[in-house]
Amino acid sequence: MKFILITVALANPMVYPDQATCEVAVNQLNAVEYYDAVCIPQGEAQPDPSDKMFSNFLGMIEKLHKMHSEPTKVSN
């Protein structure tokens, strides 16, 4: 599980691969009197709804293209 380093001064928190690495960063920051640094587990990334919409749109275009390029059957 990845861990996020939360600090007061960082607008974009740093992400570390594990808690131990994050704790090393916290200890280094606290050693130079940088207060309020903590590590928290990183949550699971949620898919962006616009990405899903775009994927669905592309899928629809591919299906329409496939339907348009298939030869039409003529019955006698």
Image (cartoon, rainbow, N blue to C red):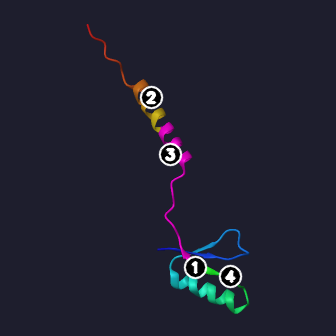
Out of 33 and 17, give the one closest to the viewer.
33
Give the alpha-carbon distance from disc 2 to disc 3, as whole Å: 18 Å
What residue is rendered at 51% in x and 74% in y?
A: 2
* 28 displayed left or right of 49: right
Chain-order first, disc 1 or disc 3: 1
Residue 39 - label:
1
What residue is rendered at 51% in x and 54% in y?
A: 47
Q: Nearer the viewer, mark 2 or mark 1?
A: 1
Question: Is mark 2 in CB contact (under 8 Å) with mark 4?
Answer: no
Give the alpha-carbon distance from disc 4 to disc 3, as whole Å: 37 Å
What residue is rendered at 49% in x and 43% in y?
A: 55
The 10 Å Cα crowd at callout 4, few under 14, some 14 to 19, many 20 or more, is few
Q: Nearer the viewer, mark 2 or mark 4?
A: 4
Give the image location of residue 19, x and y in percent.
Answer: 51, 81
Residue at the spot of label 2: 64
Q: Amino acid at mark 3?
A: Lys
Q: Is residue 70 magenta?
A: no
Q: Amino acid at mark 4?
A: Asp
Q: Amino acid at mark 2?
A: Leu
Give the alpha-carbon distance from disc 2 to disc 4, as whole Å: 55 Å
Give the image location of residue 43, x and y in percent.
Answer: 51, 67
Chain-order first, disc 2 or disc 3: 3
Residue at the spot of label 3: 52
* 11 displayed left or right of 45: right
**Depicted 47 relative to depicted 21: above or below:** above
Region in magenta? 39-58
Chain-order first, disc 4 or disc 3: 4
SS at mark 1 in the image: strand
Residue at the spot of label 4: 36
